[in-house]
Amino acid sequence: MPWELTNDELDRFSRQILVNEIGYEGQQRLLASRVTLVAPAGPGRDLAARYLQACGLTVAVEEGDGAVIRYADGFYEIPPNHRVGDFMIGWGLAVAHVIKRIAEGTISEGGDPCGSP
């Protein structure tokens, strides 16, 4: 990555940087990336947005049907489920999947989120 994390970023994300699956370069990728959450308003979407922002991603939120996290070269769709607990687990798995793939560099960082279900 062409830039270094600031002291404030190092302080804020120090625990994530220590995680082998993220590390210093992974945190740089997260900070350089943007995702879009597309879903009806609700606790799942709001919680997913908070977790994605907390890890350093820039997050846009759009009202829409279904539940999708779009990123630079694809998307992750949360399967519909009428049981609230299962739906929240789906959001959690989606957030973890997207964070891991961006940090590993297996999906593109930056750019405008694209892809559609």
Image (cartoon, rainbow, N blue to C red):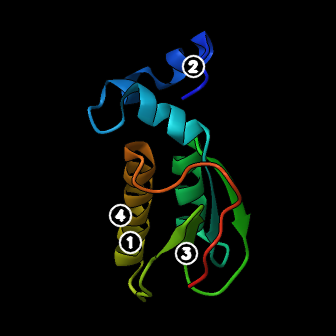
Task: Tell which circle, 2 or 1, labels the residue nearer the N-terminal end.
Answer: 2
Q: Residues within 10 Å of mark 1 (few under 14, many from 20)?
A: some
Residue 55 is at least partly visible in this image: no
Marks 4/1: CA–CA distance: 5 Å
Residue 93 is tagged as 4
Residue tagged 1: 90
- Figure quadrant of residue 69: bottom right
Judge whether 102 appears above or below 45 on screen: above
- Outermost top residue: 7
Is 90 left or right of 9, judged from the image as shown?
left
User: Are the residues at dot 2 and dot 1 in contact (C-beta closer than 8 Å)?
Assistant: no
Q: Position of residue 53 (x, y in %)?
A: 59, 45
Residue tagged 3: 68
Of residues 69 and 110, the one drawn nearer to the viewer in this rendering: 110
Q: Residue at x 45, y 50 (%)?
A: 102
Marks 3/4: CA–CA distance: 12 Å
Quick one: SS at disc 1? helix
Task: Tell which circle, 2 or 3, labels the residue nearer the N-terminal end.
Answer: 2
Of residues 55 and 108, the one drawn nearer to the viewer in this rendering: 108
User: Are the residues at dot 4 and dot 1 in contact (C-beta closer than 8 Å)?
Assistant: yes
| Residue type, label 4 | Leu
Marks 2/1: CA–CA distance: 31 Å
| Residue type, label 2 | Leu
Q: Which of label 2 and label 4 is nearer to you?
A: 2
Of residues 4 and 97, the one drawn nearer to the viewer in this rendering: 4
Q: Residues within 10 Å of mark 4 (few under 14, many from 20)?
A: some
Q: Residue at x 59, y 55 (%)?
A: 49
Task: Tell which circle, 1 or 3, labels the residue nearer the N-terminal end.
Answer: 3
| Residue type, label 3 | Val
